[in-house]
């Protein structure tokens, strides 16, 4: 029986993916084989010796100690794209909120409650204070053309906007999905300088922290509207506030407000609603569960943030999976041990990602002796060895 520990409330449809005949699932569970979570922080957590994998039901993995997991041979998964549609729809809502003072108008209309029959006339008289602009014909700059960025680009194009994008690392798959009329910029400054609206869809890392700062704001159009539904730390909040005060930035819509942004005219704070839809939570949970099952039962890896993608069809016999540092002579040492113990390899896959290599080895044997696993484990550079019978 494989044990799955949940560190957050996980959607029931996702948990139903695990066959009850093979899996035990609970929030309080000693010695789990895998952890399924959402936003729970694992940074202060002692990682159980039995832990083989962690799946984040969502895209961001800032709450998971990636380096510690890697050193222990623990595969960390996320679910990119599972919540992309939910975020895309909120980005469009954010652009509409930035275009017209909808929230201000609603708040003002509520104050007219006591005016009785005068309300319709007062509405007509006061509505001009809450006017704005249309999206059609405006230029949208999208920084990051991943799952969400591509969806936003395509729907913005269908709304009649001119769309330009910047992503030096766009994948072939995402490029194929992008509307071919969308212009790709060669530099982020060139992209920002043309935009009436700017939306951010890049991961948070050293190179992107405070990506939007005073220098970037200086190249933007006067009255630009900036949207951030990716990560709060992508934007330097003091610089945004200063830009608003100078009228350089007309509006900042953020899904990650902090105290410094609250009560600032021109800031629209949204309480981290990007993926908060029923459909998104279901999709993320199901995707995370399926990835854990395929890894635990077959050793296959899809959507890992610290291990290479690796997938191989199963044969009838024992499968050996091995993770190691990506250094010379590792495969030869592993295969030499198998040969010494008379283990014949029927199929083998070797993949690497940065400093980590991952091997899937199918054998002609229904079972593998324990000493084979033990011999491989003591090779310098080995991170993890599992036998799947």
Image (cartoon, rainbow, N blue to C red):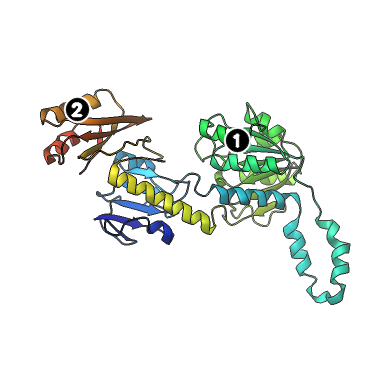
Above or below for 252 versus 188: below
Badge 1 marks a residue whose secondary structure is: loop
Q: Position of residue 180 (x, y in %)?
A: 64, 31
Is residue 115 something one can see in this rendering? yes
Q: Which residue is located at x 31 percent, y 37 percent?
A: 313
Quarter where residue 354 is shown: top left
Which of these two is toward me, 189 or 18?
A: 18
Quarter where residue 327 is shown: top left
Q: Residues within 10 Å of mark 1 (few under 14, many from 20)?
A: some
Which of these two is toward me, 318 or 328?
A: 318
Q: Earlier in the sequence, mark 2 or mark 1?
A: 1
Given contact means CB atoms under 8 Å apart, are the residues at marks 2 and 1 in contact? no
Res. 124 mark: none
**Total number of numbered discs in the rendering:** 2
Which of these two is toward me, 256 or 262?
A: 256
Q: Which residue is located at x 59 percent, y 47 percent?
A: 229
Q: Residues within 10 Å of mark 2 (few under 14, many from 20)?
A: some
Mark 2 vs mark 1: give the one in front.
1
| Residue at which label 2 appears | 335
Is 29 situated left or right of 96 in this image?
left
Badge 2 marks a residue whose secondary structure is: helix
Q: Position of residue 370 (x, y in %)?
A: 13, 41
Q: Which residue is located at x 84 percent, y 65 percent?
A: 123
Quarter of the picture containing the N terminus is: bottom left
Q: CA distance from mark 2 to mark 1?
A: 44 Å
């Amino acid at each position: 029986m494989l044990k799955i520990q949940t560190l957050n409330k996980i959607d029931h449809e996702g948990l139903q993916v695990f066959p009850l005949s093979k899996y035990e699932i609970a929030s309080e569970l000693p010695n789990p084989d895998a952890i399924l979570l959402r936003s729970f922080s694992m940074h202060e957590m002692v990682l159980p010796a039995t832990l083989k994998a962690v799946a984040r039901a969502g895209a961001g993995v800032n709450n998971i100690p990636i380096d510690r997991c890697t050193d222990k041979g623990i595969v960390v998964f996320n679910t990119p794209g599972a919540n992309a549609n939910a975020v895309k729809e909120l980005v469009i809502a954010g652009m509409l909120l930035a275009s017209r003072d909808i929230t201000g108008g609603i708040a003002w209309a509520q104050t007219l409650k006591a005016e009785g029959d005068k309300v319709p006339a007062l509405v007509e008289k006061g509505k001009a204070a809450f006017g704005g602009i249309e999206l059609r014909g405006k230029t949208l700059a999208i920084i990051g053309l991943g799952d969400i960025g591509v969806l936003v680009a395509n729907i913005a194009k269908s709304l009649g906007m001119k769309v330009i994008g910047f992503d030096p690392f766009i994948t072939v798959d995402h490029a194929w999905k992008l509307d071919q009329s969308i212009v790709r910029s060669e530099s982020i400054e060139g992209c920002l300088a043309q935009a009436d609206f700017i939306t951010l869809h890049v991961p948070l890392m050293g190179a992107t922290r405070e990506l939007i700062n005073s220098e970037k704001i200086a190249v933007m159009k006067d009255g630009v509207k900036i949207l951030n539904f990716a990560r709060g730390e992508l934007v330097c909040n003091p610089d945004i506030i200063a830009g608003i005060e100078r009228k350089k930035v007309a509006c900042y819509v953020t899904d990650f407000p902090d105290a410094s942004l609250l009560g600032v005219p021109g800031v629209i704070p949204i309480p981290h609603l990007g993926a908060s839809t029923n459909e998104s939570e279901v999709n993320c949970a199901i995707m995370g569960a399926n990835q854990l099952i395929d890894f635990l039962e077959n050793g296959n890896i899809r959507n890992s943030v610290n291990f290479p993608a690796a997938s191989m069809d199963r044969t009838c016999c024992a499968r050996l999976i091995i993770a190691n540092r990506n250094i010379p002579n590792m495969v030869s040492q592993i295969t030499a041990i198998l040969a010494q113990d008379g283990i014949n390899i029927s199929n083998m896959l070797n993949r690497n990602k940065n400093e980590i290599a991952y091997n899937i080895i199918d054998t002609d044997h229904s079972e593998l002796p324990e000493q084979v696993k033990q011999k491989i484990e003591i090779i310098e550079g080995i991170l993890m060895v599992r036998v799947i019978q």
